Amino acid sequence: MSDYEFCSFHTYTIAFIYDEKVTLSSSKSVSNHGEQWRTFRSKVQRPILQPQTVRKYVAPIEQVTSDFISYMETARDENLDLPACFDNDIHRWSLECIGRVALDVRLGCLSSDLSSNPEPQRIIDAAKYALRNVAVLELKAPYWRYIPTPLWTKYVNNMNFFVELCSRYINEALERLKTKKVTSENDLSLLERVLRSEGDPKIATIMALDLILVGIDTISMAVCSILYQAAIRTKQQEKMAEEIKRVLPDPDKPITYADLDKLHYTKAFVREVFRMYSTVIGNGRTLQEDDVICGYHIPKGVQVVFPTIVTGNMPEFVSDPAEFSPERWLGAGGRLHPFASLPYGHGARICLGRRFADMEIQVLLAKLLRKYRLEYHHEPLEYAVTFMYAPDGPLRLRMIER
């Protein structure tokens, strides 16, 4: 998740929630980089970035993931291939995980009959639309500042939908919190901690909006890439499976945070996928004052992008960048610049949900590869650059019991 993506929703959401609602005729920028962002970030970053907060969610995320794998088992065809729409199924799993973290609920995304509850798919479609079009609003001619263009109108309607959705679930959490017996912070969920410490449901709503809007599509596209690479790189997949079996000899034993800490090769595989096939194209910054970078004078207000998709594959920063080698992240030697690959950004604007994203990916790989082998028997998928970088085409993975 790039810093540019993350902050790009803030002006709308913060202005909306703090009684400065953005309308179709608003002239405000979609992107926000100032004091409002700092105020919000200072209120939520402590609870959300603490490792002990993430530990509380390993068991709930494992349950969501178990349900997802059960769905995958039944979705296979006679060749044990997953359906052509499997990338959308990954979005459903991602949303179910995020809803459990950000809203304290199971949204029902993995139900076998979504026709009876279309809301989860509507959330996925709206999040995709918002995330994939915000750059158009930001970087192309801003006609929407003067007239309500169709793109801006749909974007605003999407944001209204998300605010109403989050507010509904957060109000329910507030009511539960009133009667909940609490002896320590450990008794509280992330949402409850924010509600209790701030006393303002608006802050919790902004937090949920950010996690949902930014998390659904970026985590899902990253997982599509990771699973595809695992399926076509059988040697590395087997190394992950062997490591997972060593750490989790009993497949029925619940996964703990300590177990995930021991999955060194699995984590290195994910980092290598992020390096070679960076889901996030780059990390952006809007300069707050004039600066000189590599001898070039850059004026205040210009957006400077750090192209992770490029730097992670440059021999100046990475030895043998065309070679896929998870071992490079395990101290195998060679050149590896610490800033060559920044999948979650860096610094004050580093992705707020990065610990949860890593944990969700690790739990999915641990549960899936412990029991199944992934293969791919179709035309190779090319990677395409849209707002992100991911395999382009049906992700028809073959899922075979080990």
Image (cartoon, rainbow, N blue to C red):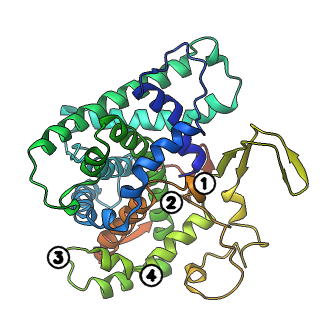
Q: Earlier in the sequence, mark 1 or mark 2?
A: 2
State the separation of the CA atoms marked 2 and 3: 27 Å
Of the residues shown, which amino acid type is indicated by label 4?
A: His
Q: Is residue 363 left or right of residue 115?
A: right
Q: Which mark is residue 225?
A: 2
Mark 2 or 3: in front is: 3
Number of numbered discs on residues: 4
Per the model, the C-alpha gap separating discs 4 and 2 is 19 Å
Can the viewer see residue 345? no
Indicate the amino acid at tag 3: Asp
Number of the label disc, if any, that sits on residue 252: 3
In space, the residues marked 4 and 3 are separated at their CA atoms by: 21 Å
Question: Upstream in the sequence, badge 4 or badge 1?
Answer: 4
Foreground mark, 4 or 2, reads: 4
Task: Kindly indicate the quadrant of the structure image that contains residue 140.
Answer: top right
The foreground one among 192 and 77 is: 192
Q: Residue at x 18, y 32 (%)?
A: 116
From where the camera sits, is residue 145 visible? yes
Specify the amino acid type for callout 1: Tyr
Q: Earlier in the sequence, mark 4 or mark 2?
A: 2
Q: Position of residue 45 (x, y in %)?
A: 43, 54
Q: Which residue is mark 4?
A: 264
Mark 1 and 2 residues: CB-CB less than 8 Å, in contact? yes
Q: Which mark is residue 383?
A: 1
Q: Tell me how far mark 1 sits from mark 2, CA to CA.
A: 9 Å
**Disc 4 from disc 1: Cα separation:** 27 Å
Q: Position of residue 220 (x, y in %)?
A: 43, 52
Give the label, 1 or 3, closer to the camera: 3
Mark 1 / mark 3, whichever is N-terminal? 3
Going 20% across and 45% down the picture, which residue do you hit?
111
